[in-house]
Amino acid sequence: MGSADGLRKIAVLIGIFAVLKVQAVPLTGDNADAGELRDDILEINRGLNHLFEGDIAVDPNRNAILDQTRRWKFPIPYILTDSLDLNAKGVILQAFEEYRLRSCVDFKPYEGESSYVSFTKLDGCWSFVGDDRVGQNVSIGARCDTKAIVQHELLHALGFYHEQSRSDRDDYVKIWWDEIEEGMQHNFNKYEDDFITDLNTAYDYESIMHYRPLSFNKNESIPTITTSIPYFNEIIGQRLDFSAVDITRVNRMYDCANTHTLLDQCSFELINICGMIQNEADNADWVQTLSNPADPDHTLAGRCRDSGYFMKFDTSSGAIGNSAMLESRILYPKRDEQCLQFFYKMSGVAGDKLVIWIRTDDGTGTVQNGRRIHTITGDGDAAWKIAHVNLKVTEKFRYFFQGIRGSSVSSGAILIDDITLTESICPSAVWQIHKFSNVLATTPLGTPVKSNCFYNSEGYAFGINVYPSGKDIAYPDYVGMTFFLCSGENDAVMEWPAKNRQATIVAMDQDPDVRLRMSSTRSFTTDTDPRWNKPTATSGQEFGWSTFISIQHLQRRSFLKNDDLIITADFNDLTHLIKTEVPVKPAAPSNEIPEEKPVSELKMRPETPKHREARAANPCGPNHCINGGVCVESKGEASCRCASSQTTYYTGKRCEKTNIDRGILGALIGGAAGTVVLTLAIFTIIRRAQ
Ligand SMILES: *[C@@H]1O[C@H](CO)[C@@H](O)[C@H](O)[C@H]1NC(C)=O
Ligand SMILES: *[C@@H]1O[C@H](CO)[C@@H](O)[C@H](O)[C@H]1NC(C)=O
Ligand SMILES: [Ca+2]
Ligand SMILES: [Ca+2]
Ligand SMILES: [Zn+2]
């Protein structure tokens, strides 16, 4: 290839993007993206000439990657200025959580530090590269309010350039210089390896930092960048989530040993079963079992011979009520919310039970005190199913699975696989669509598959529509997804319209390693539009995306593992984020020059034997941070890193909550009304007595 002909061919292949853009239908009432494919950073930033490489605020003569002084200290202080759209504030907090799940990168509300990130709605989406040490803007302009764009801009802020500016990029991509818009050639510069480092990672077509084929192009259907391996022409520029290599690089650059929110994960592939243990006091054991064609595991879905294990409790014999327990190792939570996600399959007749327990520290240091959290009863449907269980543990604990034989005619087993325990709140809606290929084949374009109604933590009821064969005639190759309010049992007491709530829909990549999942996540935030008024019995009006994910993307990765599509959704109150801006305090002149003392031979004395501190001597034991704050030892003292989950926003030394849960507020008002009635009654009695 290399001829103009070759380029034309590729143009035809990827021209679909451009064609779709041209045909983009005008705003049709129920589309969060005005019916268009969401523009990427470069299209949004078109015409902003002060930017370098499309979305980097200029100052190209430095290099954060090799320059240690440009690296951040964690947690990174941030300000959410009130110029931001409410939806942008919500997705910024979501992006923080993606970093916390996969790396040691962390963020905290600004409290007068000299280095900080100020998220501001300026023109376009852009960032500086590396820590400026004087406070810096990250612009999340109009249409930049997606989680993936925020993740991308924060990678710049952390010190990363675009993937195609690597020194060895010409081995992997071809730049079509003649097709680049006049004066934009500098956006395709590459850097030599004395300027940036690849951190010993291979060129990554899948990086969230890669340009798309149609970047700075003259002709809207002719690409400026194509890949040496043609398969990747459709991959470059993905804006789903971090790639595996993006994560490796962040973790290498910042010497991350741990993540903030991943507590435990197991796919049972190794014989040590991730440190899980059998209980001795029950009737049987869980057995690590190899997949077979009749019973494939979940991790590999039966695709590989001689691998793919799951844990199995046989319920085909023994007395009714016989049980086996499989316990996790001891875990040390940092927040007070955990979500246990796992896959299970119950192949017996209805009635077998799978019970999830936790055992916490009883105060003597041993982990006892069992607490039953959740029970799943088999319904005779032997398919792999996903389960989410919220744990709310604040001290060291084990979680465990108890399988129980529920019927004398049971002839099957209980299987579990692919467990993930993260310190986050489980989604309020989980919808698993079985046999998706059938659904796709039998549902005509424009026809939705409707979910049941789910309740969010406040009590709003909502549902999801999936259009497997497309929602809009203009986008037949895309799965559409929309959100709608259902009429629910709390409607009389809820606030209407349901404004300032962020609806988030996720099509889940079912990779067994949660850090490698590249799920598709979309969010919008509700306003005072009548569609958010109290829904009628027939249902509310839908709102969402006709281009949620392309069929082609859906068939990649593990979106359709076992032919199941798993969708999760949330509807979170962002009212407390309406006012978040804090004034910048004049920074005290900082002479905090990074200590890089040369190691002198004289100082290298033999190490004195280390005194072993008891666990209780740790300033963070017990964790005094409340509301899920993470306690971190900093210079021998306890310091709280305040978590910002999707529903709550914390601040202060101990992470006090700033918003009142609406349910509680309702109860308070109810209580107050009761008091008034009682007082009136008493007055009446007193009057009578007089
Ligand atoms: C961010 O941009 C605004 C508008 O250009 C500017 O006034 C402000 O000083 C900038 N903030 C920082 C921290 O550079
Ligand atoms: C863009 O390329 C197509 C295909 O080669 C061509 O037909 C069209 O005229 C070009 N448009 C412009 C504006 O150059
Ligand atoms: Ca046992
Ligand atoms: Ca497995
Ligand atoms: Zn960029």
Image: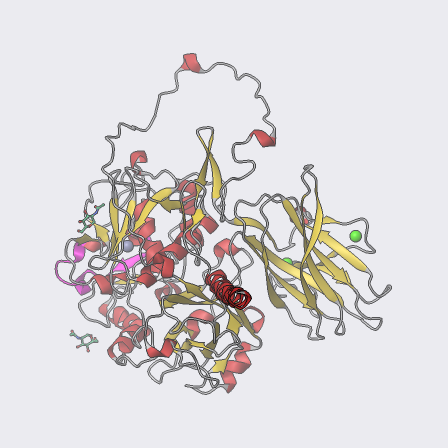
As drawn, 496 above or below 147: below
Q: Position of residue 172 (x, y in %)?
A: 34, 55
Q: Position of residue 365 (x, y in %)?
A: 67, 37
Furthest residue toward front: 690
Identify which residue is drawn at 28% across, 72% down: 11
Furthest residue toward top: 602
Q: Position of residue 501 (x, y in %)?
A: 39, 66
Q: Position of residue 580 (x, y in %)?
A: 32, 53
As drawn, 652 above or below 619: below
Q: Is residue 524 left or right of residue 618?
A: left
- The residue segment tinted magenta is 170-186
Figure quadrant of the N terminus: bottom left
Q: Quadrant of ligand 2?
A: bottom left
Identify which residue is drawn at 69% across, 73% down: 382
On the question of residue 189 being in view, the answer is yes
- Magenta span includes 66: no
- Magenta span includes 171: yes
Identify which residue is drawn at 58% across, 75% down: 434
Q: Nearer the viewer, residue 194 or 621?
A: 621
Determine the image quadrant of residue 284. Answer: bottom right
Q: Is residue 50 left or right of residue 614?
A: left
